Image: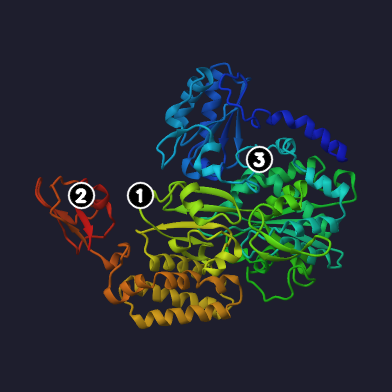
């Protein structure tokens, strides 16, 4: 494809590429069509489950059946339904197969492609209805989602820029360069109401307005791709599945604020995302969509990738900037803010946004601020010109969550702001796994807090989550059941933040360690009620005195669990019992009279702690028992209990 040297050339490229997506963009169910495409999830999770071998096998059997010219195997980004991967979607049949292995490739080709029959056993089973569903749009997991940031994930080949062009790619950038002034772009983003999706929720348009107002010869625009929350993988999936949307959005932002260079700060633990970003940047340069005189205009902009070492604290923008400069990833006090001269990259004015924020920008510019602001539960005060003045309540747009834990449908979900936790957990998530009782949901990762069943109908936005003692964070959402111990959960997150503290300020460096020590004593049965009071006082002090967001929010899991689950802490320190039965030093395993002497538990015990003869009641030696739970899982009569 030739270089795109003007707006007309981009339109020609779009028209020339549209047929590439013809089969994928149809809603018809035509299993008898000869022309087909087999879309295979190419995200990290599915690659770890032999997705590449699956694609190789599909191509092999297509060739054996002489169909290599009629049926194409396309690698896409993550479909989001990670618990069901690897995923295969056949178009235009609109048939969605789940948990597909390389050994299933032959049956898909011979039965579905050649025989024009569904492979029933590979269709998704709705966990609540117990019925098989072939159309992904009718699955509870997808039905209530509104995919904007994830719009191209699972649809496009992320390593082929022509497919991005065919789906209106770089049209938003062209609109900005040819039809809008930089101030108009800033105004459009401001009026959309989009807030930073990295966790803090600062209005993106206001951030751009501040940076655009700085008079400087050199400015930078940065993409924060240092996703570090345990269980969070939203940014990684977007970069792996739709890297060009990030490149286009950064170019739009650079035009708006007057930057010439962009940097993507991404952790080195994301090799697939790095590779696909590099491919997308290279292809964009070759087409003249990055570099000098983009699309024949005076606008010049290019992007460099900076690899991070995986420090959680580098998600904070000043620590991130220091790391990009080759210094220790430590935060600094503000002001100066990164947008100010002296506060950014090498002292230059710098704008930092995260991956999910950038992914929504092209759609905002293409469809308009009014379109985006009507999504969600945003209420704003406008000035006399009808422009955004201030937020009254709620937030606009959508938010991506990484739904995990004790939930049937694990994966990435993108929902409008204002969607309730109940809708996400029970309708999209399919309810609690194993038929267990819902206990709480942890939002915001190590920086967030627990939300209980009393708040399940809370509309999700930045303000509402803050009111009930949690936070949005980057979008981690861990569902907990009756079998999860809340003090142990707080201990898990404190162990993480203690290790991730940069050590610059004393409250975070020493305070997180002291809080962890207290939690360890509580979970081991060595705490007392006075310790609970000391723990809460220390948590409040660290919140008020730590230097950056990591230290200021590190006590949140403690404070929220103490607020809603004080009785569990009391049970640990007063009764020396763990109500959930997960703290190993606070329970023993006992075999009841329901034992039939099948010897299965005896054979499964890794340390030989169970004795007994065939057809006689068995006994556990508590001195030897390591409480691994293998005997409980294996007992057919559920005769082993925790005391």
> Compared with residue 613, is residue 556 higher up or lower down, i.e. above or below?
below
Q: Residues within 10 Å of mark 1 (few under 14, many from 20)?
A: few
In front: 11, or 397? 397
Q: From mark 2 to mark 1, how far is it between C-alphas?
A: 24 Å
Dot 2 or dot 3: first in sequence order is 3
Q: Which residue is mark 2?
A: 601
Mark yes or no: residue 393 visible. yes
Mark nearest the camera among 2 and 1 is 1
Along the line of sight, the residue nearer the viewer: 83 or 285: 83
Occupied quadrant, residue 343: bottom right
**Is 91 positioned to the left or the right of 127 in the image?**
right
Disc 1 designates what residue?
435
- Percent x, y of residue 379: 68, 61
> How many labels sit on residues?
3
Secondary element at tag 3: loop
Q: Is residue 260 visible?
A: no
Question: Which of pointers 3 and 1 lies earlier in the amino acid sequence?
Answer: 3
The structure residue drawn at horizontal position 19% and vertical position 64%, both measured from the top left corner, is: 623
| Pointer 3 residue | 158
Report the front residue among 90 and 420.
420
Q: Residues within 10 Å of mark 3 (few under 14, many from 20)?
A: many
Q: Quadrant of the N terminus?
A: top right
Check the image and name the residue furthest to the front: 384
């Amino acid at each position: 494809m030739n270089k795109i040297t003007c707006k007309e050339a981009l339109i020609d490229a779009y028209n020339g590429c549209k047929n590439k997506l013809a089969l994928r963009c149809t809603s018809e169910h035509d299993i008898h069509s000869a022309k087909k495409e087999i879309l295979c999830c190419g995200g990290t999770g599915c690659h770890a489950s032999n997705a590449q071998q699956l694609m190789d096998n599909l191509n092999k059997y297509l060739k054996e059946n002489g169909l290599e010219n009629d049926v194409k195997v396309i690698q896409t980004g993550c479909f989001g339904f990670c618990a069901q991967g690897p995923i295969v979607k056949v178009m235009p049949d609109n048939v969605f197969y789940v948990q597909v292995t390389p050994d299933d490739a032959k049956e898909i080709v011979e039965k579905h492609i050649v025989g024009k029959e569904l492979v029933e056993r590979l269709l998704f089973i709705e966990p609540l209805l117990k019925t098989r569903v072939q159309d992904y749009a009718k699955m509870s997991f997808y039905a209530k989602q509104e995919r904007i940031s994830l719009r191209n994930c699972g649809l496009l080949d992320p390593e082929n820029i022509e497919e991005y062009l065919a789906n209106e790619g770089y049209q938003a950038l062209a609109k900005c360069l040819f039809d809008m002034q930089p101030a108009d772009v800033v105004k459009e983003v401001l009026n959309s109401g989009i807030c930073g999706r990295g966790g803090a929720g600062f209005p993106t348009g206001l951030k751009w307005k501040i940076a655009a107002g700085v008079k400087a010869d050199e400015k930078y625009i940065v993409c924060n791709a240092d996703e570090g929350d345990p269980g969070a993988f939203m940014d990684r999936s977007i970069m792996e599945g739709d890297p060009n949307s990030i490149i286009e959005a950064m170019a739009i932002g650079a035009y708006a604020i007057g930057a010439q260079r962009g940097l993507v700060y991404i952790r080195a633990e994301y090799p697939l995302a790095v590779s696909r970003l590099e491919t997308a940047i290279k292809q964009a340069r070759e087409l003249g969509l990055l570099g000098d005189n983009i699309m024949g205009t005076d606008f010049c902009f290019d992007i460099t990738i900076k690899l991070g070492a995986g420090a959680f604290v580098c998600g904070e923008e000043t620590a991130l900037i220091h790391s990009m400069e080759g210094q220790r990833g430590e935060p600094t006090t503000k002001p100066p803010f990164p947008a100010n001269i002296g506060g950014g990259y090498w002292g230059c004015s710098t704008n930092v946004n995260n991956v999910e924020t950038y992914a929504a920008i092209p759609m905002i510019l293409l469809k308009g601020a009014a379109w985006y602001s009507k999504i969600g539960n945003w209420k704003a005060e406008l000035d006399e010109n009808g422009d955004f003045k201030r937020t009254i309540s709620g937030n606009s747009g959508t938010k991506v969550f990484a739904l995990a834990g004790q939930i049937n449908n694990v994966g990435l979900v993108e929902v409008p702001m204002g969607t309730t936790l109940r809708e996400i957990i029970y309708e999209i998530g399919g309810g609690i796994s194993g038929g267990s009782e819902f206990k709480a949901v942890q939002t915001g990762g190590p920086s967030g807090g627990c939300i209980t069943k009393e708040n399940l109908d809370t509309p999700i936005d930045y303000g509402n989550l803050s009111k009930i003692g949690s936070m949005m964070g980057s979008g981690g959402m861990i569902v907990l059941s009756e079998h999860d111990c809340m003090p142990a959960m707080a201990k898990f997150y404190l162990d993480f933040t203690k290790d991730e503290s940069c050590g610059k300020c004393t409250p975070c460096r020493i305070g997180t360690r002291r809080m962890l020590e207290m939690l360890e004593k509580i979970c081991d049965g060595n705490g007392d009620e006075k310790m609970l009071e000391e723990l809460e006082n220390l948590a409040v002090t660290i919140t008020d005195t730590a230097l950056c967001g990591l230290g200021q929010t590190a006590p949140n899991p403690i404070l929220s669990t103490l607020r809603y689950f004080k009785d569990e802490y009391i049970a640990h320190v007063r009764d020396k019992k763990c109500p959930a039965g997960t703290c190993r030093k606070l329970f023993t395993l006992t075999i009841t009279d329901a034992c039939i002497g099948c010897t299965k538990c005896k054979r499964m015990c890794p340390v030989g702690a169970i004795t007994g003869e065939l057809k006689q009641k068995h006994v556990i030696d508590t001195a030897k028992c390591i409480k691994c739970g293998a005997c409980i899982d294996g007992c057919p009569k559920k005769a082993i209990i925790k005391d």
